[in-house]
Image: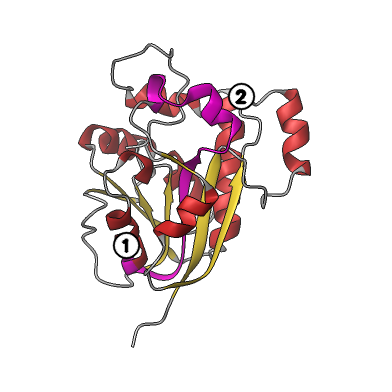
Amino acid sequence: MRKSRIDLDDNATTPVDAAAYDAWYDTPRGHWIGEREFRLAQRLLAPQPGETLLDVGCGTGWFTRRFAATGLRLTGLDPNAAWLDYARSRSTGTITWLQGDARRLPFPDGYFDRVVSIAALCFIDDEHTPLAEIVRVTRRRFAVGWLNRASLLYRQKAGRGAYVGARWHTAAEVRALFDNLPVRHLTIRSAVFLPGGGRLARTVEPLLPSGLPCGALLVAAGEVLPQG
């Protein structure tokens, strides 16, 4: 379940409601951040219309729906049944929603053309296990996002509010998570350098290259090595 995007009060202790979480993406700041993250993941995935895409840790399905709108065949997987019910209520019926554990994905090897996961593994113990599962079920390319410890967002929000329990990584640490996995052409890029989302952020963001390792979201993308 994703919960890293909500601007809850820093002293909040109650769980994030699915409707409130999804509604954040309708706010000016939430929509801007979501679009920046989506566009980075989409560019790194380079999907083709009609391909299959699995969204691991889809939560309320904001990114799932966004990718589906580009002509892909989407499956969203999350362990939270209530959030999946909300996701179903917001979709057109063309998306498959499944309750499941990212550490044991219920699919054969190479089942999906592409696999994406945005800031979901940050909340799962032993991140290497779900990462290996993502690689296993990918036929072509994957893109996985993490919260960035070398970011302004980390200084503002780490350990507070909805970020309690999240693990933050540097680009070097993300790269190390892929050690011994059958991947090639691994690329790490970032987005949302000024997470406030105001006029300055919107002006500066397009001018900064995604190769800078200081955006709030780090996305690692690559190809799966052919087996056999």
Q: Is residue 194 left or right of residue 27?
A: right
Q: Is residue 59 left or right of residue 170?
A: left
Residue 150 is marked as none
Asked whether residue 26 appears in the rendered view, the answer is: no
Q: Residue 52, located in which quarter of the rendered image?
A: bottom left
Q: Is residue 89 above or below residue 211?
A: above
- Report the front residue among 175 and 192: 175
Quadrant where the C terminus lies? bottom left
**Do labels 2 and 1 touch, CB within 8 Å?**
no
Q: Amino acid at mark 1?
A: Ala
Whole-percent x, y for residue 203 in the image: 78, 32
Q: Is residue 16 above or below residue 61?
A: above
* Residue drawn at point x = 36 percent, y = 13 percent: 12
Q: How is the image coloured?
A: secondary structure
- Magenta region, residue range: 136-163
Q: Residue 16, located in which quarter of the rendered image?
A: top left
Question: As drawn, which residue projects farthest toward the bottom?
Answer: 228
Residue 28 is marked as 2
Residue 132 is marked as 1
Q: Is residue 217 left or right of residue 76?
A: right
Crowdedness near tag 2: few (<14), some (14–19) or many (≥20) residues, C-alpha within 10 Å: few
Q: Is residue 100 above or below residue 176?
A: above
Asked whether residue 164 appears in the rendered view, the answer is: yes
For the residues labelled 2 and 1, the Cα–Cα distance comes to 35 Å
